[in-house]
Image (cartoon, rainbow, N blue to C red):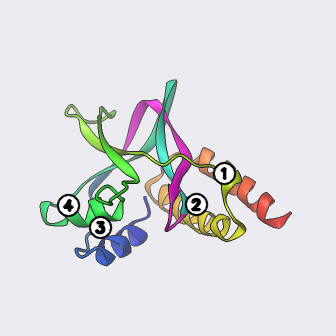
Amino acid sequence: MNEGKFREDTRREGYEFGLENAEKCFLKGYKRNLGNKSSRHGLAFTICHLENSQVDGICHDVPSKGLVAFLSKEGVLADEPSYELVMVSVSNSERPVLTLKGLKPSSLEKLSCKDKLKVCCYVNLTIEGAERWQVDCKDVLEIRKKLEEELCS
């Protein structure tokens, strides 16, 4: 959700673009989980099924010229993919949309101190982006608090 980070990542993958036609939306029946192993971030967010739950986020377009850069950035095209594309329905679209679901489950407890620091940076960037888009990120704030407590102990 952090457009600056998103632009940097897509540029690194060969075609820079931002969050085009972005709008806040809600995905019912899912929750956000910091639980997908990431070489770049230590851990990254994914979605998990959870009845009577809802994830706030943003939907955005990916230009056809940027599709490879986007899928590479997200680890979908890797030899051992980090994410898979899944089709879901969101609150403000009559058409299904594609989102990403993690394929490499992991947890904070399994990470080294160095990777926990990476996660902390990633979480802070996520919060910055969520606040910019006015996305409910109470769950992410709780994760940051837990991370800070672990890193300071």
In terms of image quadrants, where is residue 13? bottom left
Residue 80, position in %: x, y?
37, 56
Give the SS element for disc 3.
loop
Per the image, the residue denoted by label 3 is 18
* Magenta residue check for 27: yes
| Quadrant location, the N terminus | bottom left
Per the image, the residue denoted by label 2 is 123
Q: Residue furthest top?
A: 52
The segment highlighted magenta reads: 24-41
Q: Are marks 1 and 3 in contact (CB under 8 Å)?
A: no
Residue type at mark 1: give it: Ile
Give the SS element for disc 1.
helix
Per the image, the residue denoted by label 4 is 67
* Magenta residue check for 1: no
Q: Are marks 1 and 2 in contact (CB under 8 Å)?
A: yes
Which is more toward the observer, 83 or 67?
Answer: 83
